[in-house]
Image: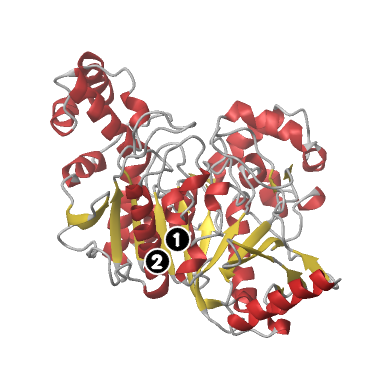
Amino acid sequence: MQMALKAVYALAMAGLALGLSTTMYADSLTAKTEQGKVHGKAINDGKVKAFMGLPYAAPPVGELRWKAPQPPAKWKGERDATTYGAHCAQGRVFDDMIFQDAGESEDCLFLNVYAPAQAKDKARLPVLFWIHGGGYAGGASSEPRHNGDFLPLKSVVLVTINYRLGALGFLATADLAKEANGVAGNYGLLDMVSALQWVKTNIKNFGGDPGNVTIFGESAGSFAVSTLMASPMAQGLFHKAIGESGGALGEGALAYQPLAVREVADAEWVATLGVTNLAELRALPVDKILDGAKKKGMVGFPPVIDGKLLVEPVTDTYAAGKQSHVPLMAGWNRDEGSFLANDMTAEKWKAMAAGLYKERAEDFLKLYPGDTNEQAADSAGAYGGDAFIAFGTWKWLEAHRKTGASPVYRYHFELRALPSKYHLGTFAFHSDDIEYVFGTLDTRPGQTVRLEDRTLSDQMMTYWTNFAKTGDPNGTGLPAWPKYDKDDSLIRLDSTIISGPDTLRPRYEFLLKGMPPMRF
């Protein structure tokens, strides 16, 4: 008993040392939401408080499968918020996606809030709202690389979310449209809007500022950021945007189609499941839906131009200047297309150029030369990255700086990581930037983390959080990051950070004249 009393006394003294009363210390891990009180936990040696598995919408199951998210239920008492909620039902999409939650479920519309330990409910700290990647088919907020231990140390509140994926998140059929007044699909994007509305209503109780929210995401999450900027439903719910490797203004695997086109394709897929109406479809076990979705490929169910969340092609919205006029920071990684360089030779590369670009092949090879096997491999990697991710992201940056009436900043992530369990070779590969932005490099299995990795990670965390605070990534102690303005200046994130004009613009101007579709 005496030892227990000493422990309580020590805890109280620790609270007093931080300028907190014992009552305030206990209350600091409790917060109010519109649904009820929640009790979180301290992480990162008590430096950060975490509230996990918070429902921002009702479980999208039964009759709510393939419907817009509905408000979550209220509860009495105090809800435990010390563990992640289930991740959304999905197939096995990427080997490097590891989840720390209780498992997989359709009941998955949860978010997590991380705040500095000392943040009070009136702190009004900037909010960073993370949208994970995974081709709109995989991923979750519970991946270790998205842990919230470190970003809040930069005086921000971090929110990470789950959203519906694949067929469960984006199926668009005529029957679904009929019951929803002509709108179908995009349930995963509607989930994001719902989560942003939850943030607007509740985040002040966690120390966040609902008037200063930055949406950011990687890969499909970056596509989502550019899409939310184009959506009339999301306007006013965020105030800044960051895109990491992806923009919904290009072509390729994540091209968005009109609802009428998708209704036909998705109806053909539904017919393979052996059901004849919507009630039977909703009654199917989730495993049968996931198994059937494999036939459509990894990104068989991208977003759709549904007439509500997206009233027109994203490109058209930006061209007309109707997107959210908010500061934008976006870029991509050096080796996004390293997969195309495998076993490439000069002979193969020239044949590929002739096949893809025909009468334009000579001009193509001036920009992506392949006179030697080594040169061909380098050009294949460069073109693979452009076709896969860079070109669409570049078009997004270009469009917003022309019509967005807001500051734009562009980066190129160039530091090549050492090999790890899931990424062999030394590349700045697709998704490589995530652990640098979150400060979670130590979560990578089997990779040695160097001093230059940790240094760049801290610099990137500071750039990102500076941008969230002011709309400008620059700050004391950091190399200057110029605006992406008339001289095409960008910053190069490497062991030594430098900035300067874009030297690759001729490649993207060539691709603007027409880029044949490629399967990834």
Q: Earlier in the sequence, mark 1 or mark 2?
A: 1
Could you tell me if the residues under marks 1 and 2 are in contact, i.e. CB atoms within 8 Å?
Answer: yes
Q: Percent position (x, y) of residue 435?
A: 46, 49
In the rendered image, the vertical position of residue 238 relative to residue 52, given as above or below: below
Which amino acid does the dot numbered 1 rest on?
Answer: Ala
Check disc 1 and report the residue beneath it.
230
Q: How many marks?
A: 2
- Front-lying residue, 292 or 414: 414
- At label 2, counting other C-alpha atoms closer than 10 Å, the crowd grade (few under 14, some 14-19, many 20 or more) is some
Determine the image quadrant of residue 468: bottom left
Specify the label residue 264 is tagged with. Answer: none
Residue 93 appears left or right of 64: left
Check disc 2 and report the residue beneath it.
322
Residue 329 shows in the view? yes
Determine the image quadrant of residue 367: top left
Q: Quadrant of the C terminus?
A: top left
Q: Residue furthest front?
A: 2
Q: Percent position (x, y) of residue 313?
A: 43, 52
- At label 1, counting other C-alpha atoms closer than 10 Å, the crowd grade (few under 14, some 14-19, many 20 or more) is many
Q: Look at the image and name its color scheme.
A: secondary structure
Q: Quadrant of the N terminus?
A: bottom right
Q: Residue furthest top?
A: 347
Residue 32 shows in the view? no
What is the C-alpha distance between the residues marked 1 and 2?
A: 7 Å
Q: Secondary structure at mark 2?
A: loop
